[in-house]
Image: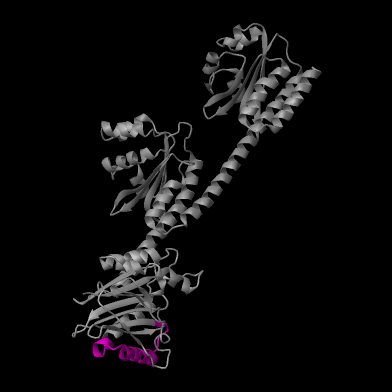
Amino acid sequence: MGENLAQLARVTSELTTAGSVEAVTKIVTHHMADALGATIAALALAEDDHVRLLGVRGIGAPEAAQWEVIPVDRATTVTDVIRTGRRLVLVGAAAIAERYPDLVNAARGERTTVTVPLRVAGRTRGSIHLSIPGGAEPHPAELEFLEILADTCAQAFERIEASEVAARQTARLAFLAEASIELAKSLDLPVTIQRVARLAVPDFADWCAIDVVRDGALHRLAVAHVDPEKVELAMALQQRWPPDPASRFGAMEVVRSGEPMLVPEITDEMLEATAQDEEHLRVARELHLRSALAVPLLVRGRAMGVITWVSTDDNRRYDEDDLHFAEHLARRSASALDNAELYSQTLAVAEQLQRAVLPESVSGTDDWEVHCHYLPSGRTEVGGDFYDAFALDDGRVVAFVGDVMGRGVAAAAAMAGMRASVRAFASVDPTPDAVMSALDGMVQRYGTEQLVTLAYILTDEAQDVLHLANAGHLPPWVLRADGAVEQLPFADGPPLGLGDGHRSGVTIPFACGDTLLVLTDGLVERRDEDIEEGLGRLRGEVHRLAGSPLSTALVELVEAVRDERYDDDVAALVLRRTP
């Protein structure tokens, strides 16, 4: 007996350090059984209304399969001990046959069975069954030690489960933190929707679908699947067989109720009940749906849509814990989608306002080809870049590009007023000196909180020249007909209203085939470099304006020089003298 107790003591030590259910099962069915000389050993755990055999040793696989799952109310040693919570010892084949006449164990010859409960925190979690050859009753000390071992085994299961829960919760918290970072990376609505769909695949779901409410109906905007080939199939499922909006089951009901839906197991009967025809049923079966969650995307108390996660893994069934996790992720996703949608709407309004105060197009003459290209920054505040070009009654052309420093409604108002003022003054006297003098006087008289720069051009084909004035603006560029590139002089004075009212202006020769480029600083400025570097980069691309048509060449030049990371508007104007 002393040797047996020593071996049981070693088993106790092993159980206290076991790190998995498999390890505990092996210790019980092998080491504990060996310590008592048992030839048959089994470990069982209670699960709801049944008992599951975690491990068994000493019987053949066909027989073991019969005992894998046992109804808790069936009369067996392991179930009786789990129900009563008390140890059961049967000494001799006769005692076993009398208590359990239907059990195969009764025909195994003379033996003793010992079954002890796994108790922890006042409840019985399972039982250990040992079958020992011979008809001798174990020593009371051995039985007492065995019960202590069983309790240690139950505690090991509690510890392992707690560790697994803690690891799962830690992983989910890390996942939610990472998800928040991912969702904050973009305010572009389509990008955000796709990012939300991909977040939980494959860690939490095998495929995910996002439906949003538009005009009272659900529209599927994104699908992510562990198998890319199944994405198209899942989209087709929604498009070809849209769900009944009046159904009390599914995504539309989640929208109406604002409550999540949990389907722990999707049965074939469910698929048959919801399929609209045989082909619909075939496609649904092909997706291998096993479990599902649908959670509303709630924003300010209303459901803007539904996010659905589906498992196609037979071993992954969603439960209440998964539902709570899905709700946490859905809240973050809904907030990100709402922010992206609001940003998209605000950006659209800002761009519409910006374009509303800028000319839809600029016009030249038979002698002068004029094109403009405006590129908004993608910010929700209106910028201050402005431009215009128009022909005078005598055939000359006025063109100008300006920039009101700052953003927002004030900058937009100042920009609209400045553009209108330039046109008004140019209609009275279009010469650069007169226009600039009038603008300087207006700004000094009425004041403005924004700095305003302006490059102003007046054509003169009779003299083969251009007249230019520059109030604090970037220098224009000239591409000669022979391909030579010239950067014109820098501004001959400060922004409007800040000088003494005297600007010299310049006159440059301008022959047929020559092209002038005027732009705002958003094209060449960078936060991490000197402006000269940006101008040098532009110089290397001015040759693109030799391309035809000129409007396309201008767009290509802007795209070649601009930096998408720099959030400033870009306005560019080209003027070419035609033969």
Nearest to the observer: residue 559 or residue 71: 559
In the image shown, does 2 or 19 lie closer to the viewer?
19
Q: Position of residue 103 (x, y in %)?
A: 57, 11
Residue at point 62%, 39% (across, down): 163
Specify whether residue 556 is in view.
yes
| Quarter of image, res 311 | top left
Residue 253 pos. (x, y %): 35, 45
Q: Could you say where residue 244 lies in the image, as x and y percent from the top left?
A: 28, 42
Of the 4 image quadrants, the one containing the N terminus is top right
Which residue is at the front of the view, 396 or 145? 396
Query: Quadrant of residue 550 in the image?
Result: bottom left
Q: Is residue 228 magenta?
A: no
State whether residue 484 is above or below residue 110.
below
Tag count in the figure? 0
Q: Is residue 229 above or below residue 215?
A: above
Q: Which residues are magenta?
A: 424-452
| Residue 444 is one of the magenta-drawn residues | yes
Q: Is residue 220 above or below residue 566?
A: above
Report the predominant secondary structure element of the magenta stretch.
helix
Decide if residue 519 is in sight here: no
- Closer-to-camera residue (498/370): 370
Q: Is residue 464 left or right of residue 293?
A: left
| Residue shown at 35% from the left, 32% from the top | 286
Q: Residue furthest right?
A: 2
Quarter placement of the C terminus: bottom left
Residue 18 falls left or right of residue 102: right
- Work out whether 422 lies above or below 324: below
